[in-house]
Image: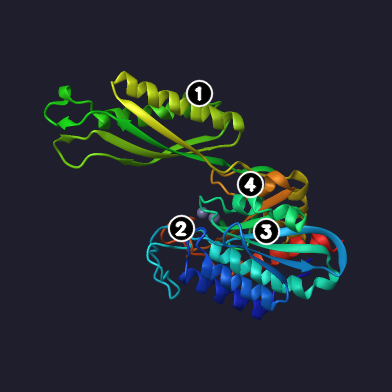
Amino acid sequence: MPTLTVSPEIAAGAVALRRDLHAHPELGFAEHRTAGIVAERLTALGLEVHTGIGGTGVVAILSGAQPGATIMLRADMDALPMTEENDVPYVSQNAGVTHACGHDAHVAMLLGAATILRASAAEIRGRIAFVFQPAEEGGGGARAMLDDGLIARFAIERAYGQHIVTMVPSGVFGLRPGPLMASVDSFDLVVEGRGGHGAMPNNAIDPVVIAADVVTSMQRVVSREIDPLEPAVLTIGAINGGTTYNVIPPRVALKGTVRSFSDATRSAMEAGIRRIAEHTCAAAKATCALDWHPSYPVTANDPTEAAFVRAALAAEFGEARVLESPPVMGSEDFSYYAQVVPACFWFLGAGDATHTFPNHHPAFDIDEKALVAGIAAYATVALAKTSR
Ligand SMILES: [Zn+2]
Ligand SMILES: [Zn+2]
């Protein structure tokens, strides 16, 4: 039984704002224009607004009519360093920067929800913290906000977040209790050989051939060392070396990403990759330098909170629009909030026949009708949690 109405004005405002943010994307920790708009809108709603948290983060507090716990709703604000390939009126105006992950929509939806919840303050017990976070795309903006005292400063006891995805039909939600998204680590690997003439490889140590060996051998960590029932991904996303046909370059540089769902797999992946890289290089008289960059942990939903969110969304939107999501190998720095307070993260579908490109694709775009569902979802979960 739907109980919450997103007015046509709020819906139209969210579309307009999402298009404005889409046209003016900003990279992590540089979301100055975006954060400025967010702070201005939240101030206009009469909320208590705090800026500059964890860099460009913004937090607004809505106090309900009755005392109670504080929960947070989160939206991330940053865009990706890539060039948009869409022919739309709101195409990115910032060269090499694109909202290809829907964070523009997250901001617009959370501001829409803040407008609705502000009008419902009389029903609310406790407080709602609207958290607009910088730098989700690799920068760890959530970590920065936590390190800036987010939880203690606002006495936050629960955290909720949603992510727009085109792999799910528009207006449909997906979530699961427990691990939802993978941990991520990345690494730089340099194979150091000895350069020389392409016609005399015996006088050189060819890092191209060695790097090729390293790339294929490292996949054996996944296929031969990790439990086949444990998810693990190793992708080499970049391999750079050499300049022309007949020169053996002195070195080759590789960049890789690793995804997993447990601490044991995570450390086994690092150990295996390091061992195979070092020994493959040594066997060919080369050396290697591996620089490991630990990144986001597994995003795990608190089972009680996931059941609560699922029930609240099903009551509002109907059971058919709330699906059990499989775990996905993508990663999220919402995981850091979930490590410190009971939390739930869910997916909001925004795909349809004309919006089929996945998140992070240069032609990623969304069915904007999903914005209404996202606004209502934030507001529904917050009201269900605070109005009892
Ligand atoms: Zn992303
Ligand atoms: Zn994202």
Q: Residue at x 75, y 60 (%)?
A: 381
The answer to whether 152 is drawn above or below residue 198 in the figure is: below
Label 3 vs 2, first from the N-terminus: 2
Label 3 vs 1, first from the N-terminus: 1
Which is more foreground, mark 3 or mark 4?
4
What amino acid is found at the position of numbered circle 3 in the picture?
Answer: Arg
Q: Is residue 177 visible?
A: no
Label 1 vs 4, first from the N-terminus: 1
Residue 369 location, quadrant: bottom right
Q: Is residue 200 visible?
A: yes
Label 1 vs 2, first from the N-terminus: 2
What amino acid is found at the position of numbered circle 1 in the picture?
Answer: Glu
Which is more foreground, mark 3 or mark 1?
1
Find disc 2 in the rendering and name its residue. 80
Q: Is mark 2 within 8 Å of ligand 1?
A: yes
Quadrant of the snapshot with the C terminus: bottom right
- Disc marking residue 321: 3
Residues packed near mark 1 inside 10 Å, few (<14), some (14 to 19) or many (20 plus): few
Label 4 vs 2, first from the N-terminus: 2
Which is more foreground, mark 1 or mark 2?
2
Image quadrant, ligand 2: bottom right
Find disc 4 in the rendering and name its residue. 335
Label 3 vs 4, first from the N-terminus: 3
